[in-house]
Image (tube, grey):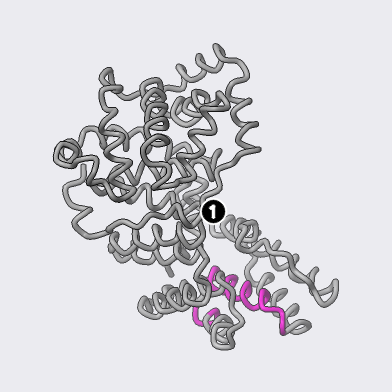
Amino acid sequence: MRVSYFCRAVIRFLKMPFRLLTIWTLAFLLPLCPALAQGLKWPNPEVEQLYKSAQASLSAGAYRQAIASYQQAIAQAPDVMILHRDLAQALLLSGNPLRAEKVIDPLIEKGEADAMSYVIAANVQMGLKEDKKARKLLDKGIEKFPNSGFLYHERGKFYEEQDNMTDALRQWVEGTAAEPTYHLNYYEAARSYMGTTKYVWAIIYGEMFVNLERSTPRSAETRKLLLSAYNRFYATPDQVKGSKKQKKTEIDNFEAAVSETLLKLAPVLSDGINTESLTMLRTRFSMEWMAAYAGRFPFTLFRMYDELLRAGHFDAYNQWLFGRAENAAQFDAWVKFHPGAILEYELFYTRHPLRPIPADAYSHDISKQMFTGAK
């Protein structure tokens, strides 16, 4: 049985190989996910207690007890959808996708399923080696919940497992437009673009992800990705060649505007790419962008640059973003030499967080050709 994409997302978050993460640990983590932590109204205290008992058993890997508790709760409250949904998940985790299918399918057929139910149903079909049915369930889920970034993420993972990175990337990019605040689609898009020649999108999506998921191993990984993306962007001959051919008056899309502005500022990086030179580059970029393109291509990330510059926190932000990923010792030295700067930036961010909006999702071509010729 293949493990659900959502389960693997939790595993990647912990930065642990799956073979070291027992399934009972996974079962414990699932109820903590925001997708499951919705407010519940129980018909009576006993049903609520049975549900909590089932969740506790699931987290301990006691599948029989968990399944029994869910079934007892369903006997008393057959109309509570989440009981059926989580019973199906327990059955799937226990290695019984056939029984899970009998529990989850009626929710789909009756139109009672939530977004998580469609994901569980799809993973049940994956466990039964019915990949086409799994894809149809994810398609149906997105049709019913078009603003679920989670469903787009899972459909992207489905395509990735089929070695179809073009469609996988397309799902994650569309997911950022469907639910701009759902962070995982930015992460998947950033790492996918590192396998293409369009590193500018790896830079954009990677930085947005780090601002949404700020203090995790995956966030630290993405900061290193950002440094690599800047290096690759400026080292790609086709980018430089393209910039010489394209006149400013011909720039009519967001991607070209960002790329051209970055390329024009390449001399700032003459001594190499590091936290200090990137801070200078990005300071100049912000000023250029606000003067030339902010009106035509409004973008919340670049507006945040301007706010940070005006508030005097842009240097600290760039240190926070790149410093430790580049050189931990140098970052610690910078922090000691600028006492309180990082804390003041983080306090500023709590009052002015990055809040992506649907308009940030500028359309751009995604094709198989993008994945050829990348480093």
Q: Quadrant of residue 89?
A: bottom right
Image quadrant containing the N terminus: bottom left
Going by the image, does 156 lie left or right of 357? left
Front residue of 333 and 363: 363
Q: Find the magenta span and give its range.
A: 79-100
Q: Residues within 10 Å of mark 1 (few under 14, many from 20)?
A: many
Q: Secondary structure at mark 1?
A: loop
For residue 161, above or below residue 188: below
Q: Residue at x 42, y 32 (%)?
A: 286
Q: Which residue is mark 1?
A: 181
For the C terminus, give its image quadrant: top left
Magenta stretch: includes residue 78: no
Check disc 1 and give the amino acid type: Thr
What residue appears at the point 26 percent right and 36 percent down from the top-left corner?
Answer: 232
Q: Position of residue 290 (x, y in %)?
A: 42, 36
Q: As displayed, is residue 31 above or below residue 86?
A: above
In the image, farthest residue toward the top:
337
Residue 248, quarter of the rendered image:
top left
Q: Which residue appears at 48% of the width and 53% of the height?
A: 184
